[in-house]
Every structure is written in structure tokens, then in C-alpha cells.
Image (tube, rainbow, N blue to C red):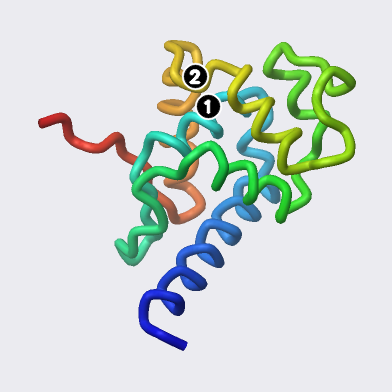
Amino acid sequence: MTGDFAELIKFMDSIDQFLLAIKTKSLHLGRFLGLLNLLVAYRITDESGQVLSNGLTFKQVSEKLKKNRWNPDDVETLGLKSAELPQRDRLRFWYVAIVRAGVGGSKASMEADTLAKAIKKIGYEAQLPEKN
């Protein structure tokens, strides 16, 4: 394996572990919009300081939710109806949900801030990147 590919695999596994921890501890409940905002906009590190992400694209978040078999009913908490989203293609399902959810809005930011505090208890840290 080349170095870049090995780093990509490690990166993806780290995000998967992060999502598993969030799901296992049910930290996303009531703040799923915040989780989406956090995945897109925040720098996420583990307890050793290893950077897991400097922010993911909507497509990358969609891939992660699909891969980790995230509960599609969670879109209901975003004010969306699951039946109105693409049913046969889970990647498109999540992508459309993220686009329609308003992950850049103030409600999403507030939920992400709350979630960022909660994930410290499970060994992760999330911070908004510094503005230049």
C-alpha cells in the first residue's frame, strides 16, 4: 500500500469508530442535525490528539452513514419524511437528506456545539476551525 492510501484507510476507519461510539452512546438522539453539522464543519480529534477529520463533504458523510447502516428514521428528526427521499439508493438517500436538512443553519450549529461538549466524555474533541 502506498502511504496516501494507507492514511486514507486509517482515516476512514477512525471516522467509523467515532460514529460507532456516537451511535452506541446514543449521543446523536435529539441532535442529529448537530451531528451532521459537526461532521461537515468541525475538526475532530481522538483522545491522543490524532486528527480524524478536518471536515467531511456531504458525499463523504453520506458514505459514512450508509456504511455504518445509520437508522434512516433519523431523518424524521430533521423535519424530513423518509418516504420522500430516494429509497433504493442509500447513498443518495443520505445525500439528499443532508442537502435538505440545512446543516449550515444556526439550529445545526447550536446542536453541534452541544454535541461537541458531549463527545468529550467518550474521548473525542471537536472544534470549529480558526477563522483567518
Among all residues in the image, which is located at the extreme left?
132
CA–CA distance in space, label 2 to label 1:
5 Å
> Which residue does the image show at 55% across and 33% down from the upper left?
35
Q: Vertical placement of 59 versus 102: above or below? A: below
Q: Is residue 20 left or right of residue 54?
A: right
| Amino acid found under the numbered disc labelled 1 | Gly
Q: Vertical placement of 73 versus 43: above or below? A: above
Q: Vertical placement of 94 versus 45: above or below? A: above
Disc 2 residue crowd, few under 14, some 14–19, many 20+, Cα 10 Å: many
Q: Is residue 104 left or right of residue 77?
A: left
| Amino acid found under the numbered disc labelled 2 | Ala
Local secondary structure at mark 2: helix
Q: How many marks?
A: 2
> Which x, y percent locates residue 132?
10, 31
Depth check, front residue: 75 or 32: 75
Q: Are marks 2 and 1 in contact (CB under 8 Å)?
A: yes
Disc 1 residue crowd, few under 14, some 14–19, many 20+, Cα 10 Å: many
> Which residue does the image show at 63% across and 42% down from the upper left?
62
- Give the mark nearer the N terminus: 2 vs 1: 1
> Which residue does the image show at 44% across and 19% down from the upper left?
104
Depth check, front residue: 131 or 17: 131
**Image mark for residue 34:** 1
Residue at the spot of label 2:
108
Picture quadrant where residue 86 is located: top right
Q: Is residue 52 left or right of residue 127?
A: right
Depth check, front residue: 66 or 124: 66
Local secondary structure at mark 1: helix
> Which x, y percent locates residue 37?
48, 29
Q: Vertical placement of 24 versus 62: above or below? A: below
> Which residue does the image show at 60% across and 51% down from the upper left?
19
> Which x, y percent locates residue 53?
40, 52
